[in-house]
C-alpha cells in the first residue's frame, strides 16, 4: 500500500475512527486487525502466510522458552535457534540471489562451473524490518526483559502497520505500554500528526518524485547526459533518497502520533553533519542503534575479540591495539548494513564498504588533519570551515550513493566514468538540461521546494518546527498551512500522467 | 467546541480556495461548463446531444428571433449515456420548459469509450453525486484496466499540473460565454450531392442492440417519472441506410412512450442544401445552422409557446447575439441581417 495513495489515506481514517470509538480495552485489537490487513494487502497467499508465521512463531515461542529457562544454557540454545529460523526466512526471501551470485563468483575463482538462475521470491512488506526487530526482541528477552505472554499482543508488536513500510526499528520494552494501553482521542495530537503527514507528503511528491524524474533521465541515458549532468544527478540523488525515506517516516510517524503511539525518531537533519560518523548518527538512527546493540557491541565484547584485543595490545601497544578489534567489528557491522539495504553488491559497496572506508579514514586521519590545521593556522571553529566539512560530508555520501542508485557495480563505475568526458568542451554543455526529465518550470519548483526544506531543516535544529508553528498566531499559522497544502496539491507529482510514487526504502 | 468550530472554518476555507483554484481556473471551457454561468432559472430550453447540436443550433439567434433562451448541454462525441445525467444537472440549476434530445449518438457501435470523450463531459460538470454516477455508468463500458474511477472523480488529479501553462500564458479564460455555446464555421464541406441511395429515408427497421436499448429505456423511464416536456430530433446530416433503419427502430420505441421524434431529414420546408449548408458530412456550417435555428426555433416557439419573461438576463443574450453577428460578418464578409432577409 503506497503511503501517499488514497487507499492508504482511507485505510488510516477507518482504522483511526474505529480505534477511537471502541472501548479502551480492545483498542489494540483494531490495530492488530488493521496491521494484518496492511501486511497481507494484495499479497495474501500460502507463501506469505507461512513466512510471516515462521518469523512470528519463532519469536513468540522461543522468547517464552528463553524466559522459562532463564540463566541456563538452554536459553542460549533457544536464542540461537530462534535467531537462526528468522534469519533463514530473511535470507531465503531476500538474499537468495546475493548468495547464488557470491557462490558463482567464488566458483569462478576456482574454475568451477556453477550455473544458476536468478530467483524472484514473494516476500512480505517489511520483512527486513520485523525480522531484525524480532531478533532484537529475542536478544532482549535473553538479556532479561520480559517476554510477551499474549500471542495476539505479540503479533501486534511484530506487525504494527506504521513501521512495516519503512521502519523505524522499535523495541518491545519501549512499545509495550504504548501499543496496548488504548489511547484517548486528543485534538492537539491530531493536528500535530496531520501537519507531520503533510510535511512527509510534501517531501515525497513535491521533491523526491520530481528529483527522481531528473535522476532517472540522466542515469538512464548517461551516454547522452554526461559530464555536469551525471555530477548534478549524483548530487541530487541523496536528496531524493532523503526526502523519500524521511518523508515516508514523517507520514507513518504522523499516523502513529494521531493514534497516540509515539515512535522513535529516525532522522536528525543528517545533511548538516560534519563527518560521515556524525552523518550516520543522524541518518536511519534506529537501524544504527539496533546494529550497535545487537551486532557491534556483542561482537566487540565476544571472547574472540577480547582475545584479539589482548594480542593486539601486546603487539602494537594500547592505543593502536585497542582499535584493531574495534575496526574489525565495525567492518562486520557495515557489511551487514550494506547487505540489509539490498541483496546486491551495489548496496554492500554503497551503504557498507564505502561508509566503513570513510569512517576508517576519518578516524585515522582526523588527528593528523587537526595537527596540520593547527600548524598552518586554519581556524576550525568558524562558519566557513564548518561549511566546508558539511559539504565534504555531502560529497562523500553522494559519491557512495552512485552505487546505491546504479543497477550493477559495472553500471556504477560507468556512471562515474561518464562524469569526466573525453571531450572536455562538452563537459559544460547544459543545452539539454531541460530534456533530461524536468523542464524549466519543474526546476523552478524544485529549487523553491529545496529552499523551503532547507529552512525547515535549519529551524528544526533548535527544536520542533511544528511546536514553533503552533505557537504562532492563527492567521500566520493558517497561511503557512494553506500554502503548504496548496503547494502540494498544485505542484505535487501525482495523479494522471505521473508514475505512482514508489518508496526507495519500501521493499526492505 | 471552539476546536470543532476552528476545524469547520479551516475546512470551509480549504474548500473555497480549492474550488477557486480548480473550478474557476482549470475547469474545461465548453458549452457544458458555460451552462453553470447562466443565472438560476433563466434557461427555457435545454438542448442535449453531441457536436451536431453545438453546430446546428444557435441559441443567440433563437433568442433574438423567438425570445426563448437555450442551453446546449452537448459536446463533441458526447455519449448518449450522459443525457440522463445532464438533464438531472439542468434540473438542479434551471427550470427548463422543454428538453430537446438529439438522437445521433444513440448508435454507439462505433463509439470508442476513451478518456477524452468522457472527460469532455465529466470534467466540465461540477463535482456532485450525479457526476459520480455518470462516471460510473460510462466507465463500466471501458476495458477493465482503464476503469480508473478515482482519476475521473477528482479531475484535479489530471489537471493540477496545468500550473505550468500559467507561466507561459497558455491558460486563457474568456470572461463570458461565447455565443452561448454555439460553434460556427462558414466552410462548405465535401458533400456536393446527397448520395442517390440516401435521398429517401428508409422505411425499414433494424433493431438496436441491447446496450443501446438499455440506455434508451433508462432515459425514457427517467423522463416519464419526472414528467418532463421532451422532444427528440434526428438532425439533418448523412446517414447510412443501416443507421436510418436503426433510428427508425429508436423512434418507434420513443413513440411508444408517447414522445415525438422529428426527423429533419424528411422536413422539406427546412430547405437544407447539401452542397452549401454543410461543413462536413455530419455538421452544418453557419448557413445551414441559421436555416435550422430559424425553422426549429419557430417550431418550438409556436408549438410550446415558450417565451422568456426575465428581462434581467436579456442584456447578456443581446450582447452574445451582437458578438455572433459581428464575428459572422468578419468571417463571411456579409451583413447578417441582409443575409437573413435574402437567404
Image (cartoon, rainbow, N blue to C red):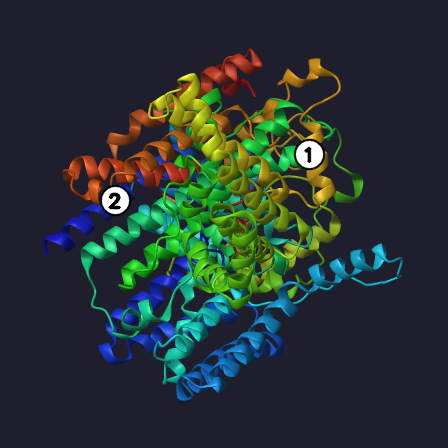
Classify mark 2: helix, strand or loop.
loop
User: Which percent across, then down, holds residue B151?
Assistant: 49, 50
Q: Residue at x 37, y 41 (%)?
A: A269
In the rendered view, tell whether residue B216 sits above or below residue A489.
Answer: below
The disc label shown at residue A464, or none: 2
Classify mark 1: helix, strand or loop.
helix
Place residue B66 in its image quadrant.
Answer: top left
- Nearest the viewer among A235 and A171 is A171
- Nearest the viewer among A104 and B319 is A104
User: Which percent across, then down, holds residue A277?
Assistant: 45, 43
Labels 1 and 2 positioned on one and the same chain: yes
Place residue A258 in its image quadrant.
Answer: bottom left
Label 1 or label 2, whichever comes before in sequence order: 1
Residue that mark 1 sits on: A415
The disc label shown at residue A371, or none: none
- Nearest the viewer among B22 and A303 is A303
- Mark 2 Cα within 10 Å, few/some/many (few <14, many 20+)? few
Would residue A386 be seen by someone viewing this image from the given angle?
A: yes
User: Which percent across, then down, holds residue B181?
Assistant: 46, 33
Amino acid at each position: 500500500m503506497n503511503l501517499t495513495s488514497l487507499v492508504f489515506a482511507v485505510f488510516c481514517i477507518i482504522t483511526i475512527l474505529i480505534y477511537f470509538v471502541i472501548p479502551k480495552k480492545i483498542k489494540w485489537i483494531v490495530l492488530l486487525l488493521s496491521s494484518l490487513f496492511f501486511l497481507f494487502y494484495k499479497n495474501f497467499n500460502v507463501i506469505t502466510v507461512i513466512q510471516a508465521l515462521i518469523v512470528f512463531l519463532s519469536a513468540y515461542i522461543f522468547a517464552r522458552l528463553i524466559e522459562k529457562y532463564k540463566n541456563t544454557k538452554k536459553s542460549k540454545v533457544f536464542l540461537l535457534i530462534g535467531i537462526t529460523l528468522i534469519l533463514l526466512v530473511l535470507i531465503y526471501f531476500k538474499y537468495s540471489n546475493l548468495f547464488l551470485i557470491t557462490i558463482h563468483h567464488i566458483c569462478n575463482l576456482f574454475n568451477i562451473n556453477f550455473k544458476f538462475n536468478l530467483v524472484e521470491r514473494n516476500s512480505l512488506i517489511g520483512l527486513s524490518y520485523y525480522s531484525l526487530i524480532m531478533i532484537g526482541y529475542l536478544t532482549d528477552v535473553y538479556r532479561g526483559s520480559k517476554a510477551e505472554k499474549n500471542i495476539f499482543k505479540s503479533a501486534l508488536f511484530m506487525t504494527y502497520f506504521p513501521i512495516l513500510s519503512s521502519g523505524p526499528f522499535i523495541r518491545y520494552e519501549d512499545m509495550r505500554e504504548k501499543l496496548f494501553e488504548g489511547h484517548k482521542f486528543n485534538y492537539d495530537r491530531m493536528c500535530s500528526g496531520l501537519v507531520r503527514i503533510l510535511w512527509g507528503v510534501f517531501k515525497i511528491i513535491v521533491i523526491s518524485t520530481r528529483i527522481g524524474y531528473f535522476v532517472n533521465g540522466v542515469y538512464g541515458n548517461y551516454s547522452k547526459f554526461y559530464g555536469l549532468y551525471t555530477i548534478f544527478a549524483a548530487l541530487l540523488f541523496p536528496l531524493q533518497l532523503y526526502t523519500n525515506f524521511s518523508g515516508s517516516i514523517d507520514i507513518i510517524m504522523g499516523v502513529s502520533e494521531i493514534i497516540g503511539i509515539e515512535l522513535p525518531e529516525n532522522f536528525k537533519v543528517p545533511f548538516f553533519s560534519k563527518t560521515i560518523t556524525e552523518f550516520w548518527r543522524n541518518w536511519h538512527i534506529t537501524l544504527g542503534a539496533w546494529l550497535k546493540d545487537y551486532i557491534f557491541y556483542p561482537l566487540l565484547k565476544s571472547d574472540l575479540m577480547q582475545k584479539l584485543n589482548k594480542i593486539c595490545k601486546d603487539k602494537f601497544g594500547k592505543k593502536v591495539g585497542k582499535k584493531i578489534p574495534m575496526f574489525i567489528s565495525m567492518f562486520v557491522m557495515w557489511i551487514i548494513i550494506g547487505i540489509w539495504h539490498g541483496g546486491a553488491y551495489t548496496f554492500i559497496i554503497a551503504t557498507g564498504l564505502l561508509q566503513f572506508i570513510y569512517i576508517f579514514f576519518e578516524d585515522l586521519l582526523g588527528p593528523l588533519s587537526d595537527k596540520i590545521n593547527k600548524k598552518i593556522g586554519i581556524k576550525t571553529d568558524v562558519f566557513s570551515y564548518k561549511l566546508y566539512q558539511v559539504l565534504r560530508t555531502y560529497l562523500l555520501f553522494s559519491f557512495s550513493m552512485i552505487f546505491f542508485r546504479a543497477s550493477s557495480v559495472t553500471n556504477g563505475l560507468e556512471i562515474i566514468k561518464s562524469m569526466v568526458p573525453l571531450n572536455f568542451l562538452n563537459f559544460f554543455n547544459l543545452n539539454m538540461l531541460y530534456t533530461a526529465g524536468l523542464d524549466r518550470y519543474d526546476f523552478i519548483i524544485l529549487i523553491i521546494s529545496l529552499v523551503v526544506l532547507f529552512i525547515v531543516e535549519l529551524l528544526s535544529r533548535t527544536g520542533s518546527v511544528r511546536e514553533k508553528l503552533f505557537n504562532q498566531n492563527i492567521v500566520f499559522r493558517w497561511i503557512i498551512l494553506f500554502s503548504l497544502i496548496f503547494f502540494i496539491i498544485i505542484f505535487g507529482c501525482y495523479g494522471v500522467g505521473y508514475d505512482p510514487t514508489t518508496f526507495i526504502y519500501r521493499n526492505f | 467546541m471552539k476546536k470543532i468550530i476552528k476545524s469547520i472554518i479551516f475546512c470551509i476555507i480549504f474548500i473555497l480556495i480549492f474550488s477557486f483554484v480548480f473550478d474557476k481556473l482549470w475547469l474545461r471551457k465548453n458549452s457544458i461548463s458555460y451552462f453553470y454561468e447562466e443565472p438560476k432559472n433563466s434557461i427555457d430550453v435545454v438542448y442535449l446531444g453531441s457536436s451536431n447540436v453545438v453546430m446546428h443550433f444557435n441559441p443567440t439567434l433563437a433568442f433574438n428571433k423567438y425570445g426563448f433562451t437555450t442551453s446546449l448541454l452537448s459536446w463533441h462525441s458526447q455519449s448518449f449515456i450522459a443525457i440522463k445525467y445532464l438533464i438531472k444537472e439542468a434540473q438542479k440549476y434551471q427550470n427548463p420548459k422543454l428538453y430537446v434530445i438529439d438522437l445521433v449518438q444513440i448508435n454507439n457501435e462505433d463509439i470508442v469509450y476513451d478518456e477524452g470523450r468522457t472527460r469532455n463531459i465529466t470534467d466540465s460538470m461540477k463535482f456532485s453525486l450525479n457526476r459520480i454516477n455518470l462516471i460510473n455508468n460510462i466507465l463500466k463500458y471501458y476495458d477493465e484496466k482503464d476503469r480508473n474511477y478515482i482519476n475521473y472523480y477528482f479531475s484535479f488529479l489530471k489537471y493540477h499540473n496545468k500550473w505550468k501553462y500559467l507561466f507561459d500564458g497558455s491558460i486563457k479564460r474568456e470572461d463570458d460565454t461565447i455565443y452561448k455555446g454555439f460553434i460556427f464555421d462558414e466552410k462548405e464541406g465535401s458533400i456536393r450531392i446527397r448520395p442517390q441511395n440516401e435521398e429517401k429515408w428508409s422505411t425499414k427497421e433494424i433493431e438496436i442492440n441491447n446496450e443501446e436499448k438499455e440506455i434508451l429505456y433508462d432515459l425514457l423511464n427517467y423522463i416519464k417519472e419526472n414528467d418532463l416536456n421532451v422532444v427528440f430530433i434526428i438532425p439533418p446530416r448523412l446517414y447510412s441506410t443501416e443507421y436510418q433503419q436503426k433510428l427508425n427502430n429508436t423512434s418507434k420505441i420513443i413513440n411508444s412512450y408517447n414522445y415525438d421524434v422529428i426527423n429533419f431529414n424528411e422536413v422539406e420546408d427546412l430547405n437544407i442544401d447539401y452542397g452549401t449548408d454543410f461543413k462536413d458530412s455530419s455538421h452544418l456550417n453557419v448557413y445551414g445552422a441559421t436555416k435550422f435555428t430559424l425553422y426549429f426555433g419557430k417550431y418550438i416557439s409556436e408549438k410550446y409557446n415558450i417565451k422568456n419573461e426575465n428581462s434581467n438576463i436579456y442584456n447578456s443574450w443581446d450582447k452574445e447575439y451582437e458578438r455572433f453577428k459581428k464575428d459572422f460578418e468578419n468571417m463571411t464578409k456579409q451583413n447578417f441581417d441582409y443575409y437573413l432577409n435574402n437567404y
